[in-house]
Amino acid sequence: MTDASRGNAHELTMSQTCSSLHAVDSCLADLYARAIEQQGALPTLKTVLLNLVIRAADPALEASAQDFAARVLTRVSSRVIVADRASSDQPEGATVSVVCGVTERGDKRLCGEVIQIHASQGAIIGGVMPLLLRDVPVYLWMLGDIASGHEDAADLLQVASHLIVDSRQAVQLAHTMKDTEWLRRAFGGPRVVQDLAWVSLHNWREAAASLFDPPAARESLADLSEITVSYLGSEDAALPPSLPLLLGCWLIGQLGLTIQGAFHSRDEGYRIDAARGDQPVPVRLIPDGSDGPGLLSVVIKCGSDAFTVKRGSDSKLDLASVHNGEHSELGSVDAPDEDDVALVVSVLRSYGTDRVFERVLELAITAIDQFLLVDERSAKIRL
Amino acid sequence: MDHSKALDVNPLREGLARERVVDPCIFVIFGGTGDLAKKKLVPALYHLYRASELPRSFAIVGCASSQLSDDGYRDWVREAVATEAPYLPTSGPEWDAFAKPIYYVDRFGDPPYSKLKARLAEIDSQARTGGNYLFYLAIPPTAFEETAEQLAALGLVKDESGKGWRRLVVEKPFGTDLESARQLNAGLLRSFDEDQIFRIDHYLGKETVQNILVFRFANEFIEPLLNARYVDSVQITVAESIGIGSRGAFYDRTGALRDIVQNHIMQILALVCMEPPVSLEADAVRDEKTKVFESMRCPDPRRIDELTVRGQYAGGTLLGEHVNAYHDENDVADGSTTETYVAAKFFVDNWRWSGVPFYVRTGKRLAKRVTEVGIQLKPIPRVLFGQDGVGEIVPNVIALNIQPDEGIAVVFEAKAPGLGYQIRPVTMDFRYGEAFGESPPDAYERLLMDAMLGDASLFSRADAVEATWELAQPILDGWQHGGSAVYPYQPGSWGPREADEFIQRDGRRWRRL
């Protein structure tokens, strides 16, 4: 069965069901031949820069996986394999699609492909491995929380060069962060691990960094005295969510601070006791008491100076400073695109190790341990 | 973290997509209403603005002879973008924000540009650009030295507070011969320090030219081959299918050697030949390139006919259309002997390249527009497969395609399907556009950014400019004094027949491109 559709003037999607995984190559060849027939004036080229394997933590996420695959493919030329779950008696067929989009220059149409397979736990490696294109990286996107529901994906980790996780989905942040760190260090595992929560902080980091591009503002950092990250969320949990935690730890690492302790109370929110030498620099993570995820602002105080990034309208982050007693509105930058696909595309366009993230992850785990230590002591005292 | 370093470098920029950012600054364009400003600079600056690469505190000041108001110049800039980059918006909030800090200063006054200093100070104060000025000389080279001196006389070469930077960007040609290049360098250096001067050769801003370094020094398989032991010869071709167009007056004074060989081709040759630099710092790269020029054998003017061929395109038909002969083009002097084609042979007399000829050729009205470096490897030592009449085994070629199909190709021998050993050359092809599906940024955008960032890696240094002129000057002298012929060639050909004979004398052929 073949289905062809044009999502818009620039896009052509053709799909076909293959009765067996053995037939995937011939199904794809057939679809490419049809795409070339329909190319019109533009030459059609197959370009594949990478393999992307998407594996959902639970069946409820599998519908999203297929949608994500098609959307990723319009932006990064790749072979996307969606590895859905299947009961062992289900026949191992596949649905293959070829998605073609016109380049920015408008001079050619580039095509990539999606292969959706259904594989039971025991069959997943045998289903995915033969379909991976050789000599290009293998990105494994584990949809959902890696600390739960991905027990069957261990084999896939052995073939992935890059692992994409999302700590925003964490049910138990401590486990998720530690699992991520363990996978990063595991011998024979993925060479690069990336967290979509961290990727979504890029524009916040860019905005905060831009406050210190002027040399005069950088001089203020010598008097760094306090950092406050405000976010949407509740104060009840033992740990802050990953977004404010990672942003706070990023500032701790980049500004040369060390973590000496951490504290959590309903009144004060979460406080990481950081210091530069013997100069204390508390890093406060303050929830607003609401349910929603996301950041509200970050304020970096340097003595009497203060540098602020604040979520303004939906699509902007507003910048401001108080420097030498003078208040300045410094314009705004785009707020992060928090759509999963946009974040994954950003990861797929990078290739190397993100050393800054690695350091931030270690700091976040240190902070988590400190928070949990305090929480444990409090619990004992309450008992 | 060493906190004292944090003041020099923004510690929060580490790992961000924009790890380096441009300081707040004023971009001053001399020749602000000229062709270069219209076609290249203004569109490139607008592209950079749209990509958020320009700092929040930024201003553009156009300087020229026309009498224009700031608004008049903004209209001129809008028209330039509308003409040269019609796909970009020239109205709406984005355009307004870009256009707002655009100003104009005319050159009238005694001395010329006497209003400039006060106007820049006023804009600097308003826009908070920290006393950082970049002066872009988009004017004829004959005015470079004088303009630099005027800037010095106005006290604009150094920031009086000592906090801001001042930079001068000049466009090639850097001189018309060795003597004028030396004079130009000396003249510019009387007003500016070498580290303030950025000499643009836009070829170096091309992605594929920069990729030569990556290809060589980020891959293990290629570098061991690039030496006299394995390389038979190198061919560098910069071919244009168009004629001189409306540039007759300029071109007739210049010719292909000065226009292309002395700068673009020499820069490409240096990237192919240089040793690995110790780092990608500007001077580390430029030191290695200069060593290549200094290692090159200086052509003997008395033997210039053995080392070069020059030609001039004749009239005729190209792709079905009549085209003029060079001497019938506008603004070309009667009886002009200016070459529109040159082929030459160079040697790099160092340990790595000793004895390997570097054949270069460039010309107008050739068969195709193509820029390529063809690295021809030596033949294999013994042919095992020639017994059943398959013919000669073609030595391998590594081709670096710089334009228009940017990429890299390796030509090698393979067994054709069938019984026996039928051998055919096949090509392994990497094309940027196909592999990455993205268009590389315009060369000017990259170079303007680098100049604003103060990164001189892709700009020519005074000693390199003079070193390349030392190689070109004997050719000019030989042609002038030896009376060598200027051979006509048909439009759409690959140059004069004599150029084929020139390389055939060495037992080689030009690559068919």
Image (tube, coloured by chain):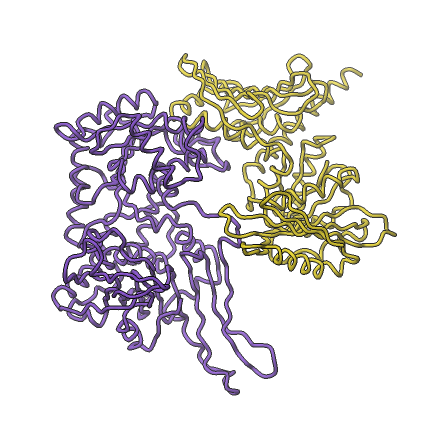
Chain colours: A yellow, B purple
Query: Quick one: B506 or B61, which is closer to the camera?
Result: B61
Residue B192 at x, y percent in the picture: 21, 37
A174 shown above or below B278: above
Query: Quick one: A292 or B11, which is closer to the camera?
Result: A292
Residue found at the very far right of the displayed protein: A89
Residue at 22% x, 39% y: name it.
Answer: B193
Residue B318 at x, y percent in the picture: 34, 64
Residue B141 at x, y percent in the picture: 20, 45
Q: Quadrant of residue A220?
A: top left
A194 shown above or below B513: above
Query: Quick one: A138 or A6, which is closer to the camera?
Result: A6
- Compared across the picture, whether A383 is left or right of A245 comes to right
| Figure disc tally | 0
Residue B171 at x, y percent in the picture: 26, 45
Q: Quadrant of residue B158?
A: top left
Residue at 70% x, 56% y: name it.
Answer: A131
- Compared across the picture, whether A134 is left or right of B273 comes to right
Query: Quick one: B428 or B196, which is closer to the camera?
Result: B428
Which image quarter holds the C terminus of chain B? bottom left
Residue at 55% x, 48% y: name it.
Answer: A102
Q: Quadrant of residue B353?
A: bottom left
